[in-house]
């Protein structure tokens, strides 16, 4: 029996050491210590187990059993970590457009084959192979929808997000229309190259307004934040941009548009539009949805935020209307954190203050994850669930470099925040010509200052 224990102990030790080396997140100085302790415990157990003295032999077997238990636990955590890193980074491989063929609810049409002519938006056409019907081109989403309402056209085709845009101005749209055919168009996203060294980077965080839970769907971007990380200084700068910022969408002409509308054309459009605005390079993207905020905060057992006023949290999504946010420190669960990050009507500065709340929520998550050692007890559960809550093009090699750096230096991170400002106005937008919409005209001085702060942090060594 003791020979079997020795063989199992030896095999597990070798497998664990190989897996730790292959994982490549442990700094060399700690790796050598782990290997030394691992081999010392194993060899001591083997030597004592073959001793003629019964007591030493028993101690040796106990040491081998302890080694087997430790190695088994170690392999469990190593394998979970490796699986998480392999599947949870560079996983933003597709984006999905869901298109709908729409008719009036009162009509007798129930099948796309019954339709002769379908109206479509000129700037939103990448599905011709899916439609055999005659198509009529429109420049304005309002003209398109009004023609359907007034029965000047039998049917229209719209992507999901455009239907959401129309809901802002046509509150009864769901009572007026029905969908008789839907299909998806999938667009592949190029994978990022593997990172070879640690360096300062910009990450764009896009908060999708999709309630469907499908992060791959192209939707408006309600949260837009650039996270500048300098690992040499252990500093993070959060730069938030209002959703209604009136900007030139990348490679477009004519009217400018709300930043939130850039998401209609895909995450790359949002990213390049922000690169143009700040004249910087954004290295990577992370896309999350409303559900992601709720689940991540609940997984880490809530976060703390410091509110500058007291108010009742009223924003739907299952938040009870009597939920009260106190002035000062509040501990929030997932739904409360989502409500807090979406609140704007209780503040005089509206969306500008909502952005500050969103930064607080992100900072609260970062602080909880990096400082709360008790989360190790939920390690496997955290990895399993978090990996499903976002999409990113960050390569696993970069994450390994950051983990190794954090383990080696074990330093806390300094987090700074900034928001670009502007003033409200009404103007025509690129995505929805034909009607004046609320937009925020950028304050160029605040944009220039934000750019300098980003560039300064990236340059620090």
Image (spheres, rainbow, N blue to C red):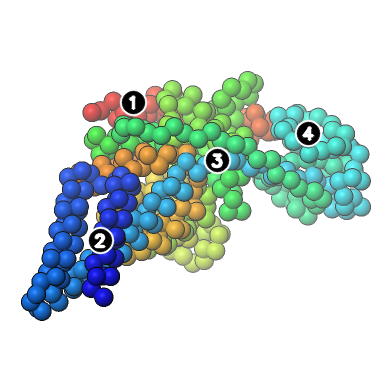
Residue 266: give its label. none
Residue 57: % across, % down: 13, 74
Residue 281: x and y in percent read: 42, 26
Q: Quadrant of residue 244?
A: top right
Q: Is residue 33 above or below residue 452?
A: below
Residue reaching furthest left? 53
Circles 4 and 2, Cβ within 8 Å, touching? The answer is no
Name which residue lies at 31% across and 55% down: 15
Label 4 or label 2, whichever lies nearer to me, is 2
Does 254 sit left or right of 153 as displayed?
left
Position of residue 175 in the picture relative to residue 7 (left or right): right
Q: Which residue is mark 2?
A: 10
Q: Which residue is mark 3?
A: 93
Q: Earlier in the sequence, mark 1 or mark 2?
A: 2
Q: Are marks 3 and 2 in contact (CB under 8 Å)?
A: no
**Mark toward the viewer: 4 or 1:** 4
Mark closer to the chain start, 4 or 1: 4
Q: Secondary structure at mark 3?
A: loop
Please tell me which residue is depicted at 64% across the width and 30% down the height of the picture. 429
Whether residue 189 is visible here, answered yes or no, is yes
**Quick one: SS at disc 4?**
helix
Q: Give neighbour class at mark 4: few <14, some 14-19, many 20+ (Cα, 10 Å).
A: few
Q: CA distance from mark 1 to mark 2?
A: 52 Å
Q: Quadrant of residue 398?
A: top left
Please indicate, yes or no, whether residue 41 appears anywhere in the rendered image.
no
């Amino acid at each position: 029996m003791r020979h079997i224990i020795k063989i199992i102990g030896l095999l597990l030790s070798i497998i664990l050491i190989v897996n730790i080396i292959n994982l490549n997140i442990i700094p060399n100085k700690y790796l050598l210590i782990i290997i030394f302790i691992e081999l010392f415990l194993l060899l001591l157990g083997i030597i004592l187990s073959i001793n003629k003295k019964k007591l030493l032999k028993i101690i040796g077997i106990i040491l081998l059993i302890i080694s087997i238990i430790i190695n088994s636990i170690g392999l469990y955590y190593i394998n979970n970590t490796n699986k998480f890193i392999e599947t949870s980074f560079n996983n933003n491989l597709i984006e999905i457009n869901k298109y709908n063929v729409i008719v009036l609810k009162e009509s007798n049409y129930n099948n796309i084959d019954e339709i002769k002519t379908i109206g479509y938006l000129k700037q939103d056409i990448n599905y011709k192979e899916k439609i055999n019907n005659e198509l009529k081109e429109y420049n304005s989403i309002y003209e398109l929808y009004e023609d359907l309402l007034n029965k000047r056209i039998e049917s229209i085709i719209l992507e999901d997000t455009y239907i959401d845009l129309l809901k802002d101005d046509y509150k009864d749209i769901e009572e007026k229309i029905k969908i008789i055919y839907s299909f998806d168009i999938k667009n592949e996203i190029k994978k990022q190259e593997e990172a070879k060294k640690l360096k300062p980077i910009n990450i764009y965080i896009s908060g999708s307004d999709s309630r469907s839970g499908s992060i791959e769907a192209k939707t408006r971007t309600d949260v837009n934040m650039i996270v500048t990380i300098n690992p040499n200084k252990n500093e993070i700068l959060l730069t938030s941009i209002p959703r209604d910022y009136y900007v030139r969408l990348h490679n477009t002409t004519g009217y400018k548009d709300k930043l939130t509308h850039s998401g209609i054309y895909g995450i790359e459009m949002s990213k390049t539009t922000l690169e143009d605005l700040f004249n910087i390079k954004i290295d990577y993207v992370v896309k999350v949805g409303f559900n992601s905020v709720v689940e991540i905060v609940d997984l880490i057992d809530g976060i703390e935020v410091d509110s500058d006023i007291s108010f009742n949290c009223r924003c739907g999504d299952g938040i009870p209307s009597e939920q009260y946010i106190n002035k000062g420190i509040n501990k929030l669960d997932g739904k409360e954190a989502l409500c807090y990050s979406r609140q704007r009507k209780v503040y005089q500065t509206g969306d500008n203050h909502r952005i500050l709340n969103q930064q607080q929520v992100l900072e609260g998550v970062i602080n909880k994850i990096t400082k709360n050692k008790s989360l190790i007890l939920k390690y496997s559960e955290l990895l399993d669930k978090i990996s499903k809550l976002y999409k990113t093009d960050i390569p696993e090699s970069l994450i390994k470099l950051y983990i190794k750096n954090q383990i080696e230096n074990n330093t806390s991170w300094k987090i700074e925040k900034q928001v670009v400002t502007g003033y409200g106005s009404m103007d025509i937008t690129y995505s929805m010509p034909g009607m004046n919409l609320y937009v925020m005209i950028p304050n160029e001085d605040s944009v220039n200052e934000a750019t300098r702060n980003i560039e300064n942090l990236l340059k620090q060594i």
